[in-house]
Amino acid sequence: MLIQPAFKLGFWTLLVFSYLQYGWAAKCGANSPSVRQTQVGFGDPPKFMVEIQNNCPMCPAIDIHVKCGSFSQTLVDPSLFKVLGYNDCVVNGGLPLAPLQKISFNYSHQKFLMSLSTWYFQCE
């Protein structure tokens, strides 16, 4: 008789840990961070607004890297967007973006093509 309650407890514990380890991360996988650029000024040079958002509603995104071409560090505060090398920029110094948090900045220059490169979800 004691085997059945112990089995149930073990089963439910395993199920909960599996959900915590794989369930949240799996749900976040479809909600990867996004990089969006919008032209907000039409002078010479034009002005762009860049928004980088963690789209996961449950887990922080950490160490977000963006392909940024030859973006110049002089165009933006490095605590928001730091150039590490050609086509490699890190968002927020690699620190976490909370669930659904957005960081934005403006720059005036010809448009740089930017896209998400790598990131990690920190689901505990």
Image: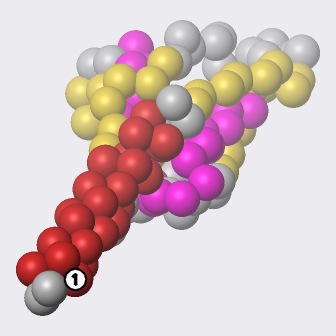
Furthest-bottom residue in this view: 2
- Which residue does the numbered mark 1 point to in the structure image? 5
Secondary element type, mark 1: helix
For the N terminus, give its image quadrant.
bottom left
Does 94 sit above or below residue 113?
below
Q: Is residue 104 in view?
A: yes
Work out whether residue 118 or residue 93 is closer to the camera in this orientation and state it: 118
Furthest-front residue in this view: 1
Res 76 → quadrant: top right
Counting from the top left corner in percent of width and height, residue 63 is at: 31, 48
Residues drawn in magenta: 49-73
Counting from the top left corner in percent of width and height, residue 123 is at: 36, 60
Give left or right: position of 21 versus 53.
Answer: left
Counting from the top left corner in percent of width and height, residue 34 is at: 58, 31
Res 42 → quadrant: top right
Q: How many other residues sit within 10 Å of disc 1, few (<14), some (14-19) or many (≥20)? A: few
